Amino acid sequence: MQKQAGRIAQFFTSIIAVVCVASLCFVFSDFIGYRSVALILLLTVSVLAMRLSLYPILLAAFLSALIWDFFFIPPRYTFHVNSYEDVLMLAMYFIVALLNGVLTARIRFFEKIAQEKEAKHHTITLYETLFNALSHELRTPLATILGASDHLLSQANNLSEKDRTSLIREIVHESERLNLLTENLLNMSRLDSGFIRPKSDWCDLSELTYTVVNRLEGALMGHRLQVEVPENLPLVKLDFGLTEQALYNLLINAIKHTPPGSLIRVVVQAQQQMCQIEVSDSGKGVPETDLPYIFEKFYQSRNAGAGGIGLGLSIAKGMVEAQGGTIRVESFPGTGARFCIQIPVEFNFLKPENED
């Protein structure tokens, strides 16, 4: 029903456009001449052909030829044409208008087919990329967990306390890796479906930051972490969960793309009704060719190490933008990269209880 209404609307559009242009030309016909009107009407049909489907274009071509003949070609207000030159011009106008409409419509049709093929190819490529990445990302931690678990069960009496602890840590580490993968896939699904709705509430930025840091305590053990959170920060109104997940993904990204011993800095600020969280590292930086695509789904730099499916930064971007914020990256080749989150917030400076 909606499709049928759209087709009817196209026919009305073609009729109204031709009639309006012809009416305007009629007012100035004494100045521009009837032959110039043919060019203007032909241009109108050409413009309509870029937007409408085939049959409305054919109607516009036929209607414009009739209007030109009846209202502009001498003698006016009749379909009779005196000169053979005008008859030839009218016939050529009608043929050119029809061919122009048909050819333009065909070009648009083939462009649509090409776009659909390109979109299908892109979808297949995306599916293959996701499938290959998932198969690797799932296989590795599962194999580690199964191997460590089997070793714990089969060699329970022969393992030292140190070996047992090491195996348990491997299981925990790989389980966390699987959990992160699952969370990223679920979060991306929620973002794509539009199910994520920010629930803003008053929260402490210091608490938010150290909640994330504590979650990543194990992963951060091989790095030097520096957290800068001013003591006098006000409470801010934002979605704690979404912001926590965005910061978590930025820190995971920094850990993954920097060598052990690198410095990772987290700087939190709240000023001018804006919450700003920066995550910078002392790694190699982001290659210039990667900067335009770094927040795209499933995109991974060729210089990146193995692991991951390219969702972390895309999800962080979605979590921030869902709150009306922005996220950007700056790269300093050879010395590191800096990611900056900015979210518009409300402030609340709590008054200490011992003050009047």
Image (cartoon, rainbow, N blue to C red):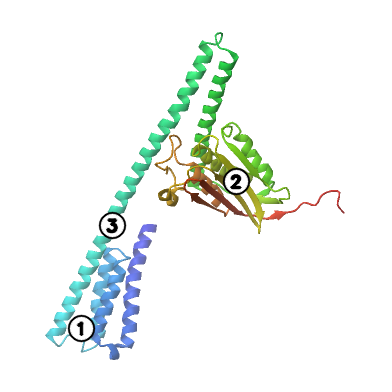
Name which quarter of the figure residue 75 lies in. Answer: bottom left
Return the disc, 3 or 2, that comes first in the chain's sequence. Answer: 3
Front one among 302 and 4: 302
Q: Amino acid at mark 3?
A: Glu
Q: Amino acid at mark 2?
A: Thr
Return the disc, 3 or 1, that comes first in the chain's sequence. Answer: 1
Q: Residue furthest front?
A: 334
* Mark toward the viewer: 3 or 2: 2
Rounded to the nearest angstrom, the CA distance separating label 3 from label 1 is 39 Å
Instruction: Kindly identify which numbered label has been placed on residue 79.
Output: 1
Q: Which residue is mark 2?
A: 243
Q: Could you say where residue 47 lies in the image, as x and y percent from the top left?
A: 31, 71
Rounded to the nearest angstrom, the CA distance separating label 1 from label 2 is 72 Å
Q: Residue furthest top?
A: 157
Q: Which residue is mark 3?
A: 111
> Disc 3, disc 1: CB below 8 Å?
no
Residue 191 shows up from this direction:
yes
* Mark toward the viewer: 1 or 2: 2
